Image: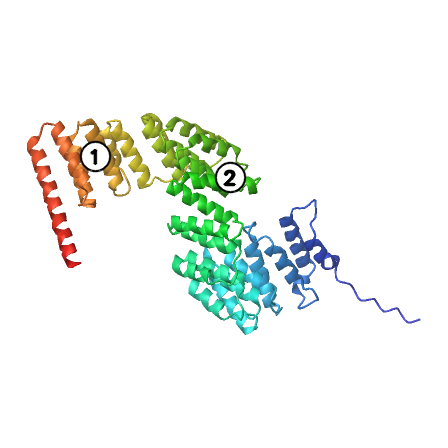
Amino acid sequence: MAPTPNPPLPLPPPYDSLPRLLLHHHRRLPRRRLVLAAHALAAVAGHLTVPAPPHHPHALLILAYARHLASWPRAPIHLLLLFRSSLRLSVPPTRHTLPLAVSAAAAASAGRHLPLALSLHAVAVTRNLLPFPHVSNALISLYARSALPDSARRVFDGMRAPDVVSHNALVHGYVKAGRLGLAVRVFEGMPERDAVSWGTVVAGCAKAGRLEKAVWLFDRMRREGYRPDDVALAAVLSCCAQLGALDKGQEVHEYVRRTRPRPNVYLCTGIVDLYAKCGRVEVAREVFDACPEKNVFTWNALIVGLAMHGHGTVALDYFDRMLVEGFRPDGTTFLGVLIGCSHAGLVDTARRIFYEMQNNHGVPRELKHYGCMADLLGRAGLIDEAMEMISSMPMEADTYVWGGILAGCRMHGNNVEFAEVAARRLLELNPDDGGVYSAMAGIYADAGRWEDVARVRRSMDEMVGVRLQWSSKMVSRC
């Protein structure tokens, strides 16, 4: 009797179950670990070395990693390595897998994978995949995120029928490159817009300092019946805070309250910043305490706002609470705390915090921190200590640092020599600063040095005369 031939061996179980394993949520295993486990099983079973089975596991795993590009820092690297592996096995990229690889290259940190992304553009050309809109859109987004709007424009112009996604990506590219005029021109020429279109251009105007324009666009967006997204809301809240437009900011806050039962951390930070900058610190504290989520920027908005409006001890209380809750302060945090100490006259506390910021918290001291300490020590009349601090600075003092010394000397009138040093340095940095002459005239007058007062006033008159002559020449030329 002839032996029964062996039946063909099926693929190992991992491949048969791979689509179901990846495309359906497993309740007991987090999605990231699920994807890594599926990747490992496919590799061990040899499926990633098979040239081209149906429903190739490379494509399934690439899709699975792509779902985590925004939330998982390692996902872009895994996806790109997997895509490279598929190319080495001569698995051709498709209109589905290539855009995912381009998106991963764009999402990778610090632009390290831009050369790879450019080579993916070449693959799209050689494989004739550019006619597919989502391939072109992925490339436009790549160039936009890399601040290469001219390259994005070339891909855009090569499309047969750019859609709203294409336009949005191009607008974003111009905004990121600081070319706001072109961004607005593309935006105004769009055949159709969505909330992302409006949010991008509103945020772009806010970023460029066109605050009134951003608020105007936001109002126009609402008039035309679009619902603002979180990007537009956060941007307009920032504009209102910087403009001091409390009424408009309250209107936006009310809209957020009605439409966002649980606002994200960016909206919460924007609302806290609005009320803190406008001096409504009690409301800012209420909003802060009600925030479902906070980050360092939320803490900074409240601490700096409290400090700027004279609530130094309260700002210190929130700083201590910030540390207790495990948040890591940054340079802005310490600037707010030092400002609070300065306004409250807490010299010893400021000294301690100034020391600890670099030695305990690893936050480097910047010019603005030295300027704040110079102001604080000057207000306290500790001019000698302030000058000693300046001599030990690792960088050259700026107008804020020397201005703190001069203001302290003017306030206490007890150190003409250091005042002269500060005035000389300030005039070297800004020869047209008339306030220096006024301060020195007052300091000399307090010291009874009337000849020096007369000399300073003559210098002031000469400076004013030069300015008038220059203005007259400019007018005559016009």
As drawn, which residue projects farthest toward the right? 1
Q: Nearer the viewer, mark 1 or mark 2?
A: 2
Q: What residue type is labelled 1?
A: Leu
Q: Which amino acid does label 2 sit on?
A: Glu
Q: Are marks 1 and 2 in contact (CB under 8 Å)?
A: no
The residue positioned 12% from the left and 29% from the top of the image is 445
Percent position of residue 190, x then y? 49, 62
Q: Is residue 154 above or below residue 219?
A: below
Note whether residue 387 is visible: no
Q: In this view, does 408 lie above or below 150?
A: above
Percent position of residue 196, x then y? 52, 54
How many angstroms separate mark 1 from mark 2 (CA)? 45 Å
User: Residue 441 versus residue 67: which sits nearer the camera?
Assistant: 441
Q: Assign the N terminus to one quadrant of the image.
A: bottom right
Q: Mark 2 points at which residue?
A: 254
Q: Is residue 74 left or right of residue 357?
A: right
User: Residue 152 versus residue 233: which sits nearer the camera?
Assistant: 233
Q: Is residue 423 left or right of residue 112?
A: left
Q: Name the residue under label 1.
A: 406
Q: Assign the C terminus to one quadrant of the image.
A: bottom left
Determine the image quadrant of residue 336: top left
Q: Is residue 430 above or below residue 290?
A: below
Percent position of residue 456, x then y? 10, 37
Q: Which mark is residue 274?
A: none
Q: Circle 2 — which element?
A: helix
Q: Circle 1 — which element?
A: helix
Along the polypeptide, which appears first: circle 1 or circle 2? 2
Q: How crowded is mark 2: few (under 14 residues within 10 Å), some or many (20 or more)?
A: few
Q: Residues within 10 Å of mark 1 (few under 14, many from 20)?
A: many
The residue positioned 32% from the left and 29% from the top of the image is 343
